[in-house]
Image (tube, helix red, strand yellow):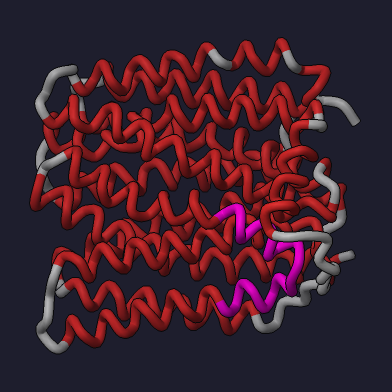
Amino acid sequence: MKSKLFNARLFIISESLILFFCMTVNFAISWYVTLSSNSPVMVAIISDLYLLPTFLLAPIAGVFADRHNRKKLIIITYGIIASFTLILAIIYTGGYYHVWMELSCVIAIGIGQAVLFPTIGSVIPDICDEPEITKLNAFRSVSESVALFTAPAIGGIFLSNFTFEKVLYLGVAFAAVGMAVLLFVKIPNHTKPHTGSFLTELKDGVKYIAGSRLLKTLFLYLIFFELVVSPITLLNQILVIREYGAEYWRLTVNETSYFVGMVAGGIILTAWGGFKKNSRNLALAAGGFGFCSAMLAVMNNFWGYIFFMFMSGVFMPLYDAPAQTLIETKASPAYTGRTFAVATMIMTVGLPIGSALIAPLEEQNLIPIKLVIFIPGALISLSSIYFFLNRKKLDEK
């Protein structure tokens, strides 16, 4: 049991190291564009170039994850992304810069994430026993949050003191270490025979989700959450710049405070284990996260703003870990990849839709930015009622 749990945690550590690579590069590009343009539309373009490939390719990746050797699929994908980034870093070192190259790097990471999200989600139930999955997901939340809060911190330091290509070299180095660790992880091979075309198998996956009361209830909320949270995700950096100042350190503190909060929340969840009822965990997460997000728009002091950004991060593992555990434990092993593929599509479509609606309005300052952030936060907080109303479906054995 201990060796199996160690193997699972080793997998999470390798994943987090490579996540650090992806996020360091992504943050660096996002901040460069944000500070140079102060344009919500440009920030939206960066976000969409990252998320749209993930959304469009996730269905194919989900079928691949159910058909093929998942460990090989992860290693090959990581290798392609790291190689592409290394080539760009070498070109930058030679003195050739162009914005399309930075954007192409974002697209490459987005394509890679399309493959990785459903595949990694499918691996968890393969390498961990069901009673330990919630704790493993809490550990995953901590590990990923450490990667996510160190990525903007180190990215900000490198951008402030070094050239952009140094950030790329740093990311590639961490990717190499992560892939080396992954080689020692034992992942069972659940390759299964093809039962039809990609489209047929994808349709089967959607039908499977629609036929599950629990998964359908969870996914309907996921659609709501991703659409409503998109203005908060998209505009928090612009809010910091407009209200408090356009310095790298403010953007760094803004990003890191949220992920430090996620680390704290993950540690609390690991030690506590959460409520026995999934509906209670999800209701607490929605209420707390929504309230803290709404307070971001109320604050007039930067450090008060940072406190509520930190607290919104504390509540997020209470949402992520139970939601992931429900999918991992309730989805049939034959459909795990496709189930996570649909979840990935939902999680990535909200921001592009939200940015298409909100960014042009904010570009012209037609709606106060604080109001655009306050209303979604309030709606998310009120949505905790949804979990109370659907508690029987979410808590079913």
User: Residue at 11% across / 42% down in the picture?
Assistant: 38
Image-quadrant location for residue 296: top left
Rendered image quadrant of residue 308: top left
Q: Residue at x 76, y 52 (%)?
A: 336
Which residue is at 42% across, 23% downward? 292
Task: Give x and y (percent) for residue 392.
Answer: 82, 18
Q: Is residue 67 magenta?
A: yes
Comparing 198 with 294, the one in front is 198
For the record, the magenta segment spans 58-76
Q: Position of residue 248 (x, y in %)?
A: 17, 52
Question: Residue 328: within the magenta?
Answer: no
Image quadrant occupied by the C terminus = top right
Q: Is residue 94 above or below residue 156?
A: below
- In the picture, which quadrant includes the N terminus? bottom right
Res. 203 image quadrant: top right
Q: Where does residue 174 sit, x and y in percent of width and height?
A: 44, 76
On screen, residue 338 above or below 96:
above
Q: Is residue 317 above or below residue 375?
A: below
